[in-house]
Image (spheres, rainbow, N blue to C red):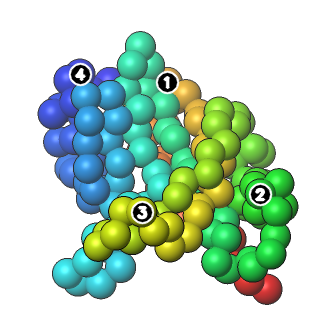
């Protein structure tokens, strides 16, 4: 198992993962959208007593005008099929306002996010779960 956060980051990079950001107890992986653009993938490694994979599924209110918060959380949860089959547990449901960067009093959108976590027992299971999580659809889209 990786030790301190720096060792965890080094092991992830050595396995071919790209880091988006890190904190003392979490390393968030990146999605490379274009050659010069990295985005938050919604997948992170949580480090505590044990390692765990955290996946955030999201529905954006602007994609579903007029839908209630409950319906939007439902759309995010509807993406969780493979995660729950693999043993992930829902740990949080949050609405996240997206502020206008030039006017913090103005909200541009609201994301309805549901977070899932799975504890892993070793490095190989960690890397395998991260690859699965990165491959999944994490944002609800209009049909």
Q: What residue would you read off at disc 1?
A: 121
Instruction: Of the two numbered discs 3 and 4 on the same chain, state the one appearing first in sequence.
Output: 4
Instruction: Of the two numbered discs 1 and 4 on the same chain, state the one appearing first in sequence.
Output: 4
User: Could you tell me residue 27's position as x and y percent?
Assistant: 32, 41
Picture residue at 41% right of the left edge, 13% below the top: 49
Q: Is residue 11 above or below residue 72?
A: above
Residue ranking furthest to the front: 105
Specify few, some or many for label 1: CA neighbours under 10 Å numbering under 14, 14-19, or 20 or more. Answer: few
Instruction: Determine contact: label 3, label 4, CB under 8 Å.
Output: no
Q: Is residue 85 above or below residue 89?
A: below
Q: What residue would you read off at disc 4?
A: 3
Judge from the rendering whether residue 106 lies leftward or rightward of residue 27; answer left or right.
Answer: right
Q: CA distance from mark 2 to mark 4?
A: 40 Å
Picture residue at 43% right of the left edge, 27% below the top: 51
Specify few, some or many for label 3: CA neighbours under 10 Å numbering under 14, 14-19, or 20 or more. Answer: few
Instruction: Determine contact: label 2, label 3, CB under 8 Å.
Output: no
Q: CA distance from mark 3 to mark 4?
A: 41 Å
Q: What residue would you read off at disc 2?
A: 69
Task: Pick whichever, 106 or 72, lies toward us.
Answer: 106
């Amino acid at each position: 198992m990786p030790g301190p956060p720096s060792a965890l980051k080094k092991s992830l990079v050595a396995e071919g993962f790209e880091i988006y950001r890190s904190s003392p107890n979490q390393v968030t992986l990146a999605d490379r959208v274009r050659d010069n653009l990295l985005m938050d993938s919604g997948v992170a490694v949580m480090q505590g007593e044990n390692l765990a994979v955290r996946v955030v599924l999201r529905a954006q209110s602007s994609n579903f005008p007029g839908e209630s918060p409950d319906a939007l959380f439902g759309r995010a949860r509807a993406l969780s099929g493979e995660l729950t089959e693999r043993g992930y547990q829902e740990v949080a449901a949050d609405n996240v306002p997206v502020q206008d960067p030039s006017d913090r009093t103005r909200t541009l959108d609201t994301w309805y996010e549901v977070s899932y976590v799975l504890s892993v027992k070793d490095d190989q299971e960690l890397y395998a779960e991260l690859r699965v999580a990165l491959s999944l659809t994490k944002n609800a889209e209009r049909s």
